[in-house]
């Protein structure tokens, strides 16, 4: 069962990585070929796409059904200096040979030396300062972030209310109400007959609303001649209600 | 084409009959809509009991024989979109100037009505949350909200 989980996870990871690769490819193409016509929003779009995909990748990794990949080890089983057609096909011609020089590069788990250096430095820095100084720093960082967020949201709100007025109103509430009334009970349509003795439409069956609530909601019965037959209403509704269509 | 037929007094019972105007040979669609369920503020969508029937062409004669009188009719032209069980209908309502003549029509207003409806088995209130989420996604182009027809009486 765990193997199955592992397989599924691997498949998900592969598909995510493939998506990421595709978007990277298109982004690079865009940068290389259309650099004179490129606008910042379009670049921003590409970045957003990449970040979204990285996000989903992370989510897949954090998913509860993912086995601990840390516990798994990848070992190259066969190393050969000959060209391998299978690998060529899978990596689109970039890795022709699964040999001793390629493997350490692709299967490495240690970060780059520069990154390692930086990490080590950060760790020593963090260990050096005392805990309450660290706490104060954390608090000030949080405060600054929240201040910034507030400023941004305020800006957005103010500009939105100013900008939307210029934009076309996409809906007209008066029209909406008129249209809904027309659909629901024919208000405003030319050949409407006055309600007469029936009074208002909805007041005819005061008890019906509560009781019918238990009945089945959808019955699609394709009948050819007699649509007003008894609809089998379940949940113990009085048959009096069901008899009304036939009245 | 939609026409609402009213029942004989004193029970104003409304049945809605509908037929397709661009496709001939399709069955008529008869629908009964009950009172809106009182779910107060919890539910984001209007819930009504609904009975749907597909019928043949002699529906209007049949209803007249049964004692129903036609109450109102209109022509709706637009588009239907579907997402799973959610149906979004965007249509413009046209008034029929001469009863029975569907060629002489005029629009009721310049706007289209956007309606999101779902037909689901009874008791599934979670559907209204899905509808609400979908409606949120359509903002700010379209503002979909729960509208109670009774309020507009």
Image (spheres, coloured by chain):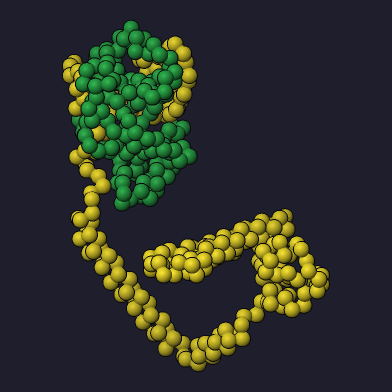
Identify which residue is drawn at 48% across, 20% down: A221
Identify which residue is drawn at 34% across, 9% down: B61
- Kindly tell me whether residue A211 is visible in this rendering: no
Classify residue A126 as left or right of residue A76: left
Q: Which chain is yellow?
A: A
Tell me residue A182's x, y (percent): 24, 29
Tell me residue A114's x, y (percent): 58, 86
Classify residue A227 as left or right of residue B72: right
Q: Quadrant of the N terminus of chain A?
A: bottom right
Tell me residue B62's x, y (percent): 36, 9
- Kindly tell me whether residue A136 is visible in this rendering: yes
Against A221, residue A11 (above or below) is below
Viewer-closest of B44 and A117: A117
Q: Quadrant of the C terminus of chain A?
A: top left
Classify residue A223 as left or right of residue A22: left
Viewer-closest of B119 and B107: B107
Image quadrant in which you'd find residue A18 = bottom right
Identify which residue is drawn at 54% across, 90% down: A121
Tell me residue A192's x, y (percent): 20, 20
Classify residue A115 as left or right of residue B95: right
Identify which residue is drawn at 47% across, 15% down: A223
Q: Which chain is green?
A: B
Viewer-closest of B125 and A207: B125
Viewer-closest of B140 and A3: B140
Number of callouts: 0
Against A24, residue B71 (above or below) is above
Against A174, residue B98 (above or below) is above
Q: Residue furthest top?
A: B65
Image quadrant in which you'd find residue A77 = bottom right
Against B79, residue A112 (above or below) is below
């Amino acid at each position: 069962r765990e193997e199955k989980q592992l397989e599924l996870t691997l498949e998900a990871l592969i598909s995510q990585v493939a998506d990421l690769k595709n978007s990277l490819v298109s982004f690079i193409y865009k940068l290389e070929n259309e650099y004179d016509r490129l606008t910042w929003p379009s670049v921003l779009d590409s970045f957003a796409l990449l970040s979204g995909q990285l996000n989903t990748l992370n989510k897949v990794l954090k998913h509860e059904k993912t086995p601990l990949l840390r516990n798994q080890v990848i070992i190259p089983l066969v190393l050969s200096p000959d060209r391998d057609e299978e690998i060529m096909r899978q990596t689109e011609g970039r890795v022709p040979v699964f040999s001793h020089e390629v493997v350490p590069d692709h299967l490495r788990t240690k970060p780059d030396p520069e990154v390692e250096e930086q990490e080590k430095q950060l760790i020593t820095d963090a260990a050096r300062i005392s805990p309450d100084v660290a706490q104060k720093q954390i608090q000030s960082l949080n405060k600054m972030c929240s201040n910034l967020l507030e400023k941004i949201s305020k800006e957005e709100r103010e500009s939105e209310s100013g900008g939307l007025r210029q934009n076309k109103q996409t809906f007209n509430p008066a029209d909406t109400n008129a249209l809904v009334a027309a659909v629901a009970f024919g208000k405003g349509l030319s050949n409407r007959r006055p309600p007469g003795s029936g009074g208002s439409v909805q007041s005819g069956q005061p008890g019906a609303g509560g009781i019918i609530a238990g009945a089945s909601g959808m019955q699609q019965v394709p009948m050819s001649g007699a649509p007003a037959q008894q609809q089998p209403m379940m949940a113990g509704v009085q048959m009096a209600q069901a008899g009304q269509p036939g009245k | 084409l939609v026409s609402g037929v009213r029942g004989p007094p004193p029970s104003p019972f409304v049945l809605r009959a509908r037929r397709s105007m661009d496709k001939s040979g399709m069955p008529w669609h008869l629908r009964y809509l009950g009172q809106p369920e009182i779910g107060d503020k919890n539910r984001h969508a209007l819930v009504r009991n609904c009975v749907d029937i597909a019928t043949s062409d002699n529906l209007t004669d049949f209803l007249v024989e049964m004692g129903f009188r036609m109450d109102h009719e209109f022509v709706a032209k637009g588009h239907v979109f579907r997402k799973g069980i959610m149906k979004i209908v965007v249509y413009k309502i046209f008034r029929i100037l001469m009863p029975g003549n569907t060629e002489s029509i005029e629009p009721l207003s310049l706007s289209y009505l956007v309606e999101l409806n779902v037909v689901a088995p009874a008791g599934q209130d979670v559907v209204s949350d899905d509808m609400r989420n979908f409606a949120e996604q359509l903002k700010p182009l379209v503002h979909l909200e729960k509208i109670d027809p009774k309020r507009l009486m």
